[in-house]
Amino acid sequence: MKQIKSILVIGNGMVGYKFCEKFVVKEAAENFKITVFGEEPRPAYDRVHLSEFFENGDAKALEMAPRSWYEEHNIELITNERVTDIHRASKTITTINDKTFSYDYLVLATGSSAFVPAIKGVEKEGVFVYRTIEDLEGMMAYADKLKKSNPDAKAAVLGGGLLGLEAAKAVMDMGLEPHVVEFASKLMPRQLDTRGSSVLKNKLETMGIHIHLSKATNKILGEQSITGMEFGEYDKINVDMLVVSAGIRPRDELGKTCGLKMGTRGGIVVNNKMQTSDPEIFAIGEVALYNNMIYGLVAPGYEMADVAVDQILGTSETLMSPDIDMSTKLKLIGVDVASFGEPFMPVEKGYSIIFENKTKDLYKRINVSHDGKKLLGGILIGDASDYNMFHQIYLNGLPIPEDAEELILGARGEGSSSFGSAMDIPDAAQVCSCESVTKGAICSSITEGGCNNLADVIAKTKVTTGCGGCKPMVVDLVNETLKSLGKEVKNSICEHFEYTRQELFGVIKIKKLKTFDEAIDTCGKGDGCEICKPLVASIFASLYNDTANKEEVIQDSNDKFLANIQRNGTYSVVPRIPGGEITPDKLIVIGQVGKKYNLYTKITGGQRIDLFGAQLNDLPAIWKELIDAGFESGHAYGKSLRTVKSCVGSSWCRYGMDDSVGFAIELENRYKGLRSPHKFKGGVSACIRECAEARGKDFGIIAVEGGWNLYVGGNGGATPRHAQLLAEQIDNETVIKYLDRYFMYYIRTAAPLMRTSTWLDKLEGGIDQLIKIVVDDSLNIAAELETEMQGLVDAYQCEWKQAIENDDMVSRFQHFVNSEDTDDTIVFVPMREQLQPIAWDK
């Protein structure tokens, strides 16, 4: 009879659990007995998504596995019991309750604890660390107590790294005014360069998070409880709570006391087999010092667990990778942030290509070898949708375009991706670094393993269950593999609605659902999220022409406040000027409003006037003055019609073949307020000289002999696209009829946030199919589409006018919930006889 060997695992965090999970699936696992010790009172849970605890307070939802899982796999789980000593000579351990356990192999997965700097007063009431569910429960209880006595309570987070910004979101979720205090001169100093950090900083500030950089905290103020933080004699901030998230320290005390080899600055030294200086004791996760580094990411910890399992079972060829990939992608407070490879590029290694759009808080940096053939690393902020392909190109040394800037700007004039398909990467490419899942394993789980959808693939391979950063690429691989087998691919909106946008549009229409609660109760689950709420709001608007005022809580921030938020937290006001035609009297009103409220004024490319720098409190008053003068909302903030640009046409131009201004005004007034999957723009030119740039719009109309030529599916931007001819030599009435059908078919069938150009590219049959549907009525739905459009036109209301005539709606336009005060932290500086926000930190 074989002797059963004992494995003791000290630490029941994510990495300790992963060791157990990987061990029990091995054939030789039956020859071992595993006992796991955890200090916390519950089984292992997902610390990566710890902030989700604030959404519902459900600790069970974060569990890696229930207690029953341990029992089913013959693992003894001992929680709420700390191991105090390791006795290497006798191969035993002792717990705080004086219980003794013997081992053949010992696995230290004790992880790390929050690093708390030695600051005077850090022990005061109201100071917390951000590490465990118990920490979060304590923070929530304290925040509730604060808000009862002070509704304007403030909380600071000490540390502007990954965990610190995650903690800042937690503070916001608790209803406290958030402040982030960082010792370094930039946020996320290990992952971001100075310019990228500046973009992130300003984005977070527009969301209401106060950022304090280059601050060395020397004292926590207050007597029994915290009242503030002092940085210097005259430099301090008043706060009512502090969350310390200034880094981690390995929980290595057991290694020290039993004489294992330690790192100079902490951590238990391990080799590439995860063995400590005692070959029968292994260390994995954040307690392990490998390559003189403590790795605080999930993926390296999981790889360490895998190596330790194989080494204990005798598979000696499984070794830890010599180089650890520290690439990471996450969404911080709703903002995409990612870095991969070598984010900071020494000039001797290569050069950097940078794209920055401060108006949209976008920053993209890629680092390329001197010969322009290899991608070495990069940083993405605001839009990390290309992260997975960048990561694979970097990891696998895949070729890059001759003009490397196409990786971030797109192929010139073609609007196509410079990456190719996810299917082009090698089968051996590791897609999920957390679970070490390759592209080949994902695809073969479908072709050979019987999986039929994403959920099946996740259940079989564990892909995406770690940090989740690989999910977009996994979705692409699953969809492309299913398509290659002739199987149906369904692109669900999110976890709350198992429908595509097109399907949900149909369900809401048929069931006549009118509110988000009705929609999610009838055909969804859970409470909704930042993806599905604005999408459902858009569907309601497209079906019933509901304004953003009806359910402002499910709108994007710009729609909620009926204005575009700018980089300093102020808003822009853009009244509609149909066709670009405006009277001198109306021009004077705009000038008076701009002067009265001290607004920066600029004529836009869409032939209207933009007023920048309005404080939230002033928006209703500004709108009233404009409305009294005959203006309406220009919907510059919405996924809706923006403008219909025009040349002066036959009224004035000697080349003009028709009244382009009059027709542009008619079209803009017809489609104003029309909500759709994405914004859309139009243009009307009175001759082929094309002064209105109509073929660069979602719809463009050009006067020719015998009528108008109608073009659709164009756009400008980083990947400009010429619109394609839908019909030629048609009269005004026919143009409107075809546009009604075109818009309604687009609204019915496009995916979320899909421009008309992309939609037309993806439409099976392309422009030829669209002509059949819109012009030839091949689907026999033309009359229905026209009727739906006329219903929306008839239901139009100006959102600004609706808001200022309702006291309850007006009340939401306040910077502070309990005060009518304006934000006195907003600073403007002179610029060319006007004002602009103070410059960003360099």
Image (cartoon, grey):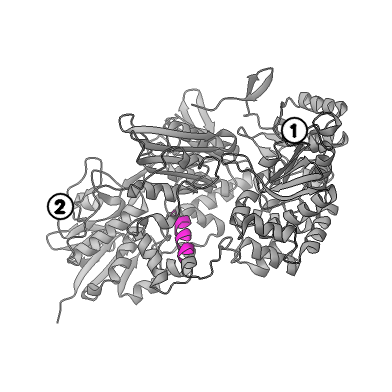
Queried whether the magenta region covers residue 477, the answer comes back as yes
**Residue 644 appears left or right of 335:** right
Tell me, yes or no, whether the two marked residues, 1 and 2, touch with CB atoms within 8 Å: no
Please give left or right for residue 622 compared with residue 442 in the image: right
Q: Residue at x 40, y 36 (%)?
A: 189
**Foreground disc of the pair 1, 2:** 1
Answer left or right for 236 relative to 587: left
Q: Which residue is mark 2?
A: 277
**Furthest residue toward bottom:** 1
Q: Is the residue 655 above or below the residue 381 in the image?
A: above
Q: What is the x, y in percent for residue 11?
A: 31, 59
- List the residue tagged with mark 1: 607
Dot 2 falls on a residue whose secondary structure is loop
Q: Residue at x 50, y 37 (%)?
A: 363
* Front-lying residue, 670 or 796: 670
Q: Report helix, strand or loop for mark 1.
A: loop
- Residue 190 place in picture, x, y as percent: 38, 38
Q: Residues within 10 Å of mark 1 (few under 14, many from 20)?
A: many
